[in-house]
Amino acid sequence: MTSAIRIENLTLGYDRHPAVHHLEGEFKVGSLTAIVGPNGAGKSTLLKGLMGMVRPLDGRVHLVSPDASKIGFLPQQTQLDASFPISVLDTVCTGFWRSVGLFGGIKPDLVDRALAALNEVGLAGFENRPAGALSRGQFQRVLFARLMVQDASILLLDEPFTAVDDKTCADLVAIMHRWHAEGRTIIGVLHDYVQVRENFPNTLLLARECLDWGPTERVLCSENLDRARLMAQAWAADAPVCVRVDAA
């Protein structure tokens, strides 16, 4: 299996203070990987680094596979302004920005694709409703529909199943598995270890640095999780810029 994304000595952070230290590894084409760790462990920062939204302080992210430049991103709902006056259909159609541009017109065939995506996530007939009037679970379905129309080969999901009802969670997990069956590379930030064990064969455990990366059964052992908690507790907000010192 070839690599979709290769990470080389990657350090990411803000104001020159690292949030992810010297990460090395790769995401294989068609893999399904969870990123887990304590709060503040750098999980969402890593997704943003893979997207190019956060520039490396050191190292690099290398998109290996020919179509790896087509990356779809599902952000946390807390990062979005749901009160903005936009319809459900228009929200889904923002997923076409890469092909039509920010100010390009949405042609009828694209509207049909957006409506089909809404039907697939269980929101047929919701297209004209204000997005801000939806429940949290319904809005998460809309975000999945928007990701669906992007038709990306790599999908980055930031807390995709958090704070939604059980029915919505089960439906969205099923959609994720369909994407995986289509050969897409899926990387998701999650907090629920039960969901990870049930649905993600591979896991990256972060506590600002990689504690383990590989088969989920091995990574999510009690020893690793205890180490992650201890490392997160020891973190200092005013820590200096991290510099790797190679052994002589």
Image: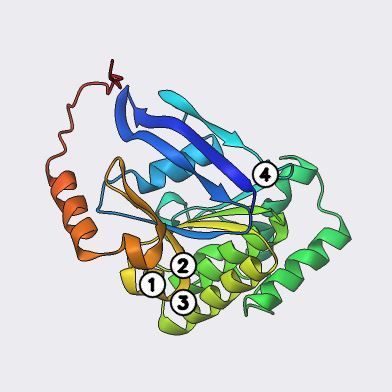
Disc 4 marks which amino acid?
Ala
Q: Is 185 above or below relative to 216?
A: above
Q: Position of residue 107 (x, y in %)?
A: 86, 55
From this view, report whether residue 134 is shown above or below residue 209.
below
Q: Which residue appears at 47% of the width and 52% of the height?
A: 81
Measure the alpha-carbon separation of dots 1 and 3. Answer: 15 Å
Amino acid carrying label 2: it is Phe
Q: Could you tell which of marks 4 and 3 lies nearer the N-terminus?
A: 4
Q: Is residue 116 left or right of residue 171?
A: right
Circle 2/circle 1 CB separation < 8 Å: yes
**SS assignment at label 2:** loop
Q: Give the farthest residue toward the top.
A: 248
**Hey, what amino acid is under mark 3?**
Cys
| Quarter of the C terminus within the rendering | top left
Q: Residue furthest front?
A: 248
Quarter of the image where the N terminus is located: bottom right
Residue 40 image point, x, y percent:
26, 46
Residue pointed to by mark 3: 169
- Which residue is more in the foreground, 18 or 243? 243
- For the residues marked 1 and 4, what is the alpha-carbon distance in whole angstroms? 26 Å
Left-right relation of 9 to 70 = left
Question: Badge 1, how many Cα within 10 Å: few under 14, some, many 20+?
Answer: some
Depth check: give the residue in front, 105 or 194. Answer: 194
Q: Nearer the viewer, mark 4 or mark 3?
A: 4
The residue carrying mark 4 is 68
| Mark 2 lies on residue | 200
Crowdedness of circle 3 by 10 Å Cα count: few (<14), some, many (20+)? some
Of residues 122 and 132, the one drawn nearer to the viewer in this rendering? 122
| Left or right of residue 167, residue 115 in this image | right
The secondary element bearing badge 4 is classed as loop
According to the picture, the residue beneath numbered tag 1 turns out to be 197
Mark 2 burial class by Cα count in 10 Å: few <14, some 14-19, many 20+: many
